[in-house]
Image: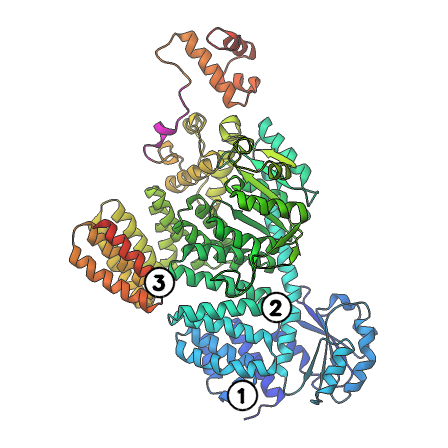
Amino acid sequence: VVLTVEERNALLERAWELRTALDYRGLDELLTPIPLATLLSEPELGYWLASAWEHLGRWSNSLALLRAMAEPCRRRGNDRIFRDRMNLEAIVLIRLGALSEAESLLLDLNQAAREAVDENSSMLAAANVGIIYNIQGRWEDAFASYQFAIVLCQRMGNRRFLGLTHHNLGIACRQLTLLHEAHDHFRKARDHLRAEGSADQIAFSGMERAILLNLMGDVQLAEATVRRALQEFIALGHLPGEGDCRRVLGIISSGQGRHEEARCYFQEALEMVRAAGEPLTEAEVLEEMAVLDQQVGNGAVASALAEAAYAIYLRLGSPPRAEQLRVRLAALT
Amino acid sequence: VTGASTAPVLAVLQLSDSFADQWARLAATAGATVRCGGSVAELGRLPEACGVLVAAGGVEVDAFGVLPELRGNGGPQVAVVGAETEYRLPVSLMRAGASNYFALPGDLSGLRSWMVECAERVLRGARVQALARAQREQYDFSLLVGESPAFRAALDRAAKVIPRGSATVLITGETGTGKELIAQAIHYNGPRAEGPFVEVNCAALPASLLEAELFGYEKGAFTDARTAKPGLFEAADGGTLFLDEIGDLSLELQAKMLRVLESRRVRRLGSVRDVEVDVRIIAATHVDLPARVKRGEFRKDLFYRLSVVPVELPPLRARGEDVLMLARHFVDRFSREYEIQVPALTPEIHRAILTHAWPGNVRELKNSVERAVLLGEGVLREDDLFLEGLEAAQALPGPIPFPATLDEIMAAAARAMTERCGGNKSQAAKMLGIGRRHLYTLLSSPAGGEG
């Protein structure tokens, strides 16, 4: 089916409107009936459909379309879409747990972006590769990636990304026990996200900071901070955020010896993140539950919970996180 | 220029009417508006456009006639749109100055991508300016709180260096005194404000990783170097590189750092070629660098290179009533941020703030105030200011002897307050609620130690 210029323009226009409105279902309905050959001849349409599928959780479909687009995209010399496509493919691979493949693709993207002086793609590559390192527990590598991404965010004048990257850098610093640095990064994240971020991103930033405050020994402030974040997530109807906040409340309660309260929080968190389809957070909740049971001497229960967490970490392509849990439990034995 | 003033404008030179009704709609999907004209003169001021599109469907050869004029003084990119698909035409057009050629209807997607790139260049410039403006407002020198002579002296010195965009600055001071804040104020109020502010904590990473991050590397320079990567020196080009905790740099890296400062060139690991960098260096440390130089732990030549403009930030305990000004500032800020009613700073809170040692300096005060504001929900309580069990441990060190005579106690109080006020005796007298003469008397008494 060959579309006329007018038909293609009308389609592009409608797809653009839906994309601007973040209406991924609408994009799916509009573009799924379009023949593959047309999508491949109009790489932007193909890219938007793959992006909609990524948001709708149809990762395998998205991956197949993105891979089918690679060669036509290259042949047509549309380098910008080619690089956007690489970044999206890496995101889908991360979702599917193929972290090494995603890392490799992002490093290639970084190289291609540098050669084309495309700092936007460089920024995305650096930020996303940092996320892979976060999942894998490679905190120093994550630190370095985010540090570089921050420079690119500044060069792009992208405050939202700047806020998100400071947030992720805060997490990496926290894991590297650079606590003051982590605190400063969470503050900067909040400043930038308050200017240009969304309400759930601001709430997430508060929640991660609460974990840091707890680590720094300020239990009271940690609890007040995470409760504020929880209220924000409840108001937004944001189930994964709500579940994550309950995990943090569980960590705080557990640290204070309030084991039954912690167990309740973890159980609620587990149900919520499972319902929301957040496997990494699910593994993190299971990890905290295992640690709690190990602390109170329920070795068998702890092992079972840890096994469930290991399985998810491995499925997500993160053996180092599984290993870190093993070490954590061994230290408690 | 037509369209909304904030949207980038694409100039369309219509040599033919093919697809004429499509340009505005297509440009809109790229976030741009269009301005059409039948001749170059009709297009108006070209430098204001994000790109120029020559619509030459059916009359492609005519594009050669307008390209010299369109590209005459540089200006925005020019793309030609036609119907001809024969490969020699685009090659010739690009030789004549066109950046791209799109043959419609087949290459609509490519044309849109080009429009997006043109629009993005303009939008990006506007975003960078907006970010720099917002940061300048946040780090404006006039907003830095403090009136104590030592702090004002540091600020004055820092302010003098702002217009000298390449001058290296060394900021010293205890942890938490605000070294990064001063560095950012220098950057965002100066000529490099639209460039990046790149912060590197030299103590955060192992030496080998830090070296790779700072200087970058070529593909294959070491086992994990799968692709080449520029370092943070290169990334900071046009901006400022803030090297925090410079005192923790290894001797090997100190030598490399010295080379960059002397030559303003960096060499990636595994490379044989230097890259020129235009970066202002601001270094900071809480350690006594001259002492490190004496011990041979820090290179003397690097120390002198770094301390072209030294700025020494005083600890909070030597800033007198600045601590109260800062507390008030943070109370206002966090109340606003958390949307909590601004609580009053009661005399009890004043006393608690004044008698605490603040070993963590401004950072500790800021955290404490945030804590008290958030936990107090509209009421500032002394208990909320400090973590449990911290007050006793971190209260001012005990300069007041006990048991002692009343004279000894009064003299010790005079000494302690004078020290807290950074040697400013008028202020110390005011804080103690006595006259200056009385303070001098106490200080010069045998117990006062200034006889």
Q: Are marks 2 and 3 in contact (CB under 8 Å)?
A: no
Q: Amino acid at mark 1?
A: Thr
In this rendering, the answer to whether A324 lies above or below B409 is below
Locate residue B197, reporting x and y percent: 59, 50
Q: Which residues are magenta?
A: B388-398
Q: CA distance from mark 2 to mark 3?
A: 38 Å
Q: Nearer the viewer, residue A147 or A38?
A: A147
Q: From the image, which quarter does the N terminus of chain B lie in? A: bottom right
Res. A168 in view = no
Q: Tell me what residue is drawn at x 74 percent, y 66 percent.
A: B48
* Same chain shared by disc 1 and disc 3: yes
Which residue in the protein does label 3 denote?
Answer: A240
* Callout 1: chain: A
Asked whether B378 or A12 is in front, the reply is A12
Image depth: mark 2 or mark 3 in front:
2
Q: Residue B130, relative to residue B137: is it above or below?
A: below
